[in-house]
Each structure stands twice: as structure tokens, then as C-alpha cells.
Amino acid sequence: MVRSIRHDMLPQPTADEASRQQFSVAFKQALNRGLRPGLAPVFEKVAGPEWEKVHGHAPASRDEIREAMLANPTYRSWSSLARAAQEQMWVSVGDSIFRERERLAAKARELTAPERRRGSLSLDPAFVPPRGVTAVDIHLQTGGYAMDLGGGDVSAGALYECGGNLYAFGQGLGKNDSKAAHVQRFIAERFPHLKPARILDMGCSAGSASVPYAMAFPEAEVHAIDVGSGMLRYAHARAEALGVAVHFHQMDCGATTFPDRHFDLIVSHNAMHEISEATRLGLLRESLRLLRPGGLCVHQDVPLSFRGKTEFQKFDLGWDTLNNNEPYWEVYASADLVADMKAAGFPPENTWVGNLQAAPGSLPWFVACGWIPA
């Protein structure tokens, strides 16, 4: 399942809108590939020595490094441009989505009509998304992750998919990159005998990872959960547009309402860096509770760990916390997932934590997995 897959729930940009989106990708690539690698020499040769003249010692912690770099005009210029590029990315896809908002909602209703739908959608009117999701517009997404404008609105999901694709291309990821495909290869290599009858995707967002599991395991019953109603409406319609059955539910991944031992395979994709430490531990505990004997959970995320990093690298990685509305970015980077898996109840001999081998045009995605012996 490639990032560039086409389906009926995508907005149709005008020529001008498509051009702005292409510029947004090129702008981000120039900042990430061309300019960001030069920030370390700026610190070593200019910002660090200037800070040392004032304080009498070289900046040692990431907080001192941040203070030194924020006093440097080159770094401030790059940081301002990086923030502007992220904002421009959302505007460039938002122009198409909000122009077509009513059409997308109508298309969603058509695709999910009872007489034609394969999967299902269960929204909880009493559900309140966690404050960590609603208090800020995570990664500056227009309107926020949990935005719901009413009337069957699907804008949040459309923004997430379209903006997420541009973000990935701007980071240098290829159009054929698929996090679900990486995890599925890992499962096939390490757990070749797993034949799941029931699968759960935790923190599914727009459902771009949920669908590949339904395609890879056509005999399995696939469920997916998230906290945003607009996001889930889009995910449901998107799955229907691609012709697969996925059952979407509005739930917190740290406290689901599924019965014990309900799933053979539980996955998540880039969810751990978007949730609090308490919710992350809840996600792992729920994984243990929900797995059947012989079952497996694989939680994939960005390879962001502070372990083994220099203080400058920690400072650099922390840019997203302060400038891209990622409140749990450094919380995740500082986590010890081996200890977390053990605290959740997985025996060390039934866990594997580490980076997957990077494929061309991709990253060495991180996974934390645990299994229940048959």
C-alpha cells in the first residue's frame, strides 16, 4: 500500500493548488536536506564559542545549546523557515479540502451507505478526546487532530492523509514507503506461522495503515480505533473506497472496551510519540490484556530515541516539541520501551525492541513488540 495511492476520498486540487503543494515539498526538502545538516557546524564554530565567551564554559546540556543557538541569526532564520514551511504545507492541502468539504462529506455518506458498506463505524457521542490531543493543533494540523465541523465532516482525516503525504515527501521518504508494509515484512520474517483471525490497529488516524492489514489478511476481521470522530469518518469512507472491510471505533488506546483475549495481532503506527507516558503504558497493558495465546503486538514509530545521542543531537531532535506542537515528542524519545514492555507485563523473553532495517526511500522504523506463547 503506497503513499501515493489514489481513491475517491481524496480532494481534487486545482492546478494552482497542486503547484503550491509541490512547492511545499521542495521547500521542506531544501530545509531538511540542504540547510539542517549545516546547523551542527554553526554551533561548533560560531554559536557555541560565542556562548562560552559570555558564560565561561562551553554549552554542555541541550538547554544550554538551545540558548546558544537561539542567539544565532542563522539558526533563528532556519527555524523560522521550517515553521513557515510546516504551516504552508497545511494551507496548501487545506485549500483543496475546505473548498471540497461538502463534496467529501457527501462522498463519505455514499461510500458508507448501509447497502454497500463492507466495514462499520462506531462513534461515541459521550466520548471526550484527551486534552493532549485537543489542547494544541498537533504538528500544526489545521483545526487540530480531533476537529469535527459537524454534518458528517471528514476534514480532519483528509488533512491528515494529504498533509502527512507531503510531510513524508518533504522528509525524503519515497512514495512507495509504507509503514504497514515494513511491519508486515517483519512479522513474516520473525513470526511466519502467525495467521491472525482478528486484528486491531490502535491510533489508526486516517486508516492508511488499517487498510493494508485487511488486504494482507483477507480472512481476518480488522478493527481500528482512534479518538477523533472526523478522523474516523474519513478512515471508514477511505477503507470503503478501497474496497476493504475495516471496523472503526472511537476509543482511547490506553483504555479500550474490547473483551479480554480478543485479538491475534495488535499494531500501531506512529502513535506512541503522539500520546502521554501514561497512555503509552496503557496501550502496552491493553495489548497484553487483549492478545490471545499465540498472539502478537507490534507498535511501530519513528526511530527517535535519545539513547546514544549527543546533547546537540537531542537539542536538534527537540525542535518539534517547541515549534511543531508535538507535546510528547521528547517524552517518547526519552522512553525506555524495554522497561515499558516489562512494566506492562510482557516477560523479557517474549519481547523484541529495536529498529527495522531501512528500506530504500525509508527510515529504520522502530518497533516494540511482544507476544503471548501459544
Image (spheres, rainbow, N blue to C red):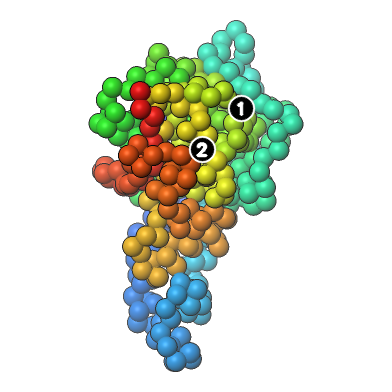
Q: Report how far apart the C-alphas of labels 2 and 1 lie in the structure.
A: 13 Å
Q: N-terminal of the two: label 2 or label 1?
A: 1
Pinpoint residue 371: horizontal percent, then vertical percent. 38, 32
Seen in the picture, residue 54 relative to 169 is either above or below; the reply is below
- Considering every residue shown, the one lying at the far top of the view is 115
Q: Residue 165 carries which label?
A: none
Q: Picture quarter containing residue 334?
A: bottom left
Q: Picture quarter containing residue 294?
A: top left
The residue closer to the viewer here, 206 or 23, is: 206
Q: Residue 257 carries which label?
A: 1
Pinpoint residue 222: horizontal percent, then vertical percent. 48, 21
Asked if one can make out residue 362 in the rendered structure from this viewpoint, the answer is no
The residue closer to the viewer here, 354 or 222, is: 354
Q: Residue 285 carries which label?
A: 2
Asked if one can make out residue 279 in the rendered structure from this viewpoint, the answer is yes
Left or right: 374 in relation to 246: left
